Image (spheres, rainbow, N blue to C red):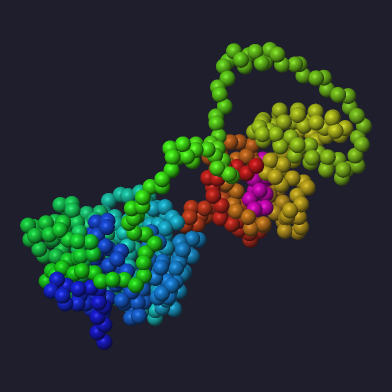
Amino acid sequence: MTVGVDIGAKGGGQRAVVDLEELLATRLLVQGNSGSGKSHLLRRLLEQSAPWVQQCVIDPEGDFVTLADRYGHVVVDASGTERDLAIIANRVRQHRVSVILNLESLDVDRQVRAAAAFLNGLFEAERDHWYPMLVVVDEAQLFAPAAATEAGDEARRQSLAAMTNLMCRGRKRGLAGVIATQRLAKLAKNVAAEASNFLMGRTFLDIDMARAADLLGMERRQAEAFRNLERGQFVALGPAMTRKPETVKIGAVETQGRGGSPKLVPLPEQPSEDAHALIFTRGEGELMPRREPAPVSTAEVLSQLARSRPEAPPAPEAPDLFAEAERDEAIEEVLTAMLAEPEAGFQPVSILYQDFLVRCRIEKIATPLDLPAFRKRLALARAGVGQGERAVEGGDWDQATLVAASLPEDIRGVFLLVARAALLKAPCPSDADIAKAYGTRSPGRARRLLAYMEERGFLVCASDLRGNRLVMLPDLGWQTAPGDADAVAAE
């Protein structure tokens, strides 16, 4: 059965029809500068062919998600891990569901990784599921670049390999690539060369016009015609459309994208005094930028030291007024009060121990902890998981403390901080939180602590496609929720 997809009108008024079966076998390349109408063309092709063939759209800007309401596409937001996306892609082929992979919430590097994982999942489906599918990739120069881009080298290699598989080897697996790019010079040649059908829109750079003319078999002097094309006009050539280059005007679409060019809107009329107040007056609930403290001169510091009072003599020993359980609770309160001070968590242990002894005398705790015991309790208190842990009490937490006992004393608190987040299904602590729990301000030290525990099998670090970190604890079978590793430390 031959299915013709109407995409618009030719110069002579005839309908421009794409042979869908031929397109599935020969693939399509769309090129045009920003504003030439590429997205409109892709939307027209998707709308007209939706009843006839399964579709997958790789959408870096979230422009095509509006197809879902009218044509039943499932929107796949690129969250989770690359393995999750590969599994979803395999199910898409198995159940023949049209989908839109929405990448708008990711940066370029993660967009490239997500697209590569999804395309590989489509490509590696079992033979029984090799049904015909139209795979539309917008902004293809991001995923198959001719040179280095913002994405990392490893991500770029993965994506380029996936795009090459789609265009070179996808036909036998039922995958028909439709790729659109702003500039042919930015698109990898081995990917562009696999297309046999072309729709070339408005182009201004000489190098892109020359490549477009070569692909269409036109003479170089005819390449100037691409500068004169109107928005929505494309020069078509290929076995699925026409045997000689013809100008096509793309027809209307039934759905609208969320993007598009901004419209001119008159500026609001208001006195200059009101405009000044709008900019420089703090709104309700708006935080003002933090001001850095003014620098203090050396002379002023020396003067303050000279005026400082001598340290008070230690108070005499007092009898212990607490039973053992009450004594532990009192020590816990002393440690909590100590670490509540802004800089206490970053002081050396020796200074903190002296402060601890003074506070114990004030509270009449006659037999405080010795230094080794204080180190253990301090590590837990810094991590917020002290002896009196209430939020996660029970047998599960006891198991976590047993696992932590195999680690050095100064790291146990960090492990229990992560374990508590995993048990409560809370986001993974940030580098700043981990560093604060260890008594340092260095995020690099926090990452080294996690790497140390990962090398010894206590935990496994991973990240989702949004770049958030999650930690799995194999011995406990727990896993944290994704959390921003670069977030500021919690109060």
* Left or right of residue 320, residue 432 in this image: left
Q: Residue furthest bottom?
A: 1
| Residue 165 is inside the magenta segment | no
Is the C terminus in the top left, top right, bottom left or bottom right quadrant? Answer: top right
Residue located 14% across and 65% down the image: 216
* Left or right of residue 420, residue 20 in this image: left
Visible residue check, residue 167: no
Residue located 48% across and 65% down the image: 84
Q: Residue 39: where, in percent of width, then height?
A: 30, 64
Question: Against 25, is 359 above or below?
Answer: above
Q: Residue 198: where, in percent of width, then height?
A: 20, 67
Q: Residue 300: where, in percent of width, then height?
A: 61, 15
Question: Against 272, is 238 above or below?
Answer: below
Residue 181 quadrant: bottom left
Is the N terminus in the top left, top right, bottom left or bottom right quadrant? Answer: bottom left
Q: Which residues are magenta?
A: 408-421
Main secondary structure of the magenta stretch = helix
Residue 47 quadrant: bottom left
Instruction: Name the one closer to the observer, 117 or 458.
Output: 117
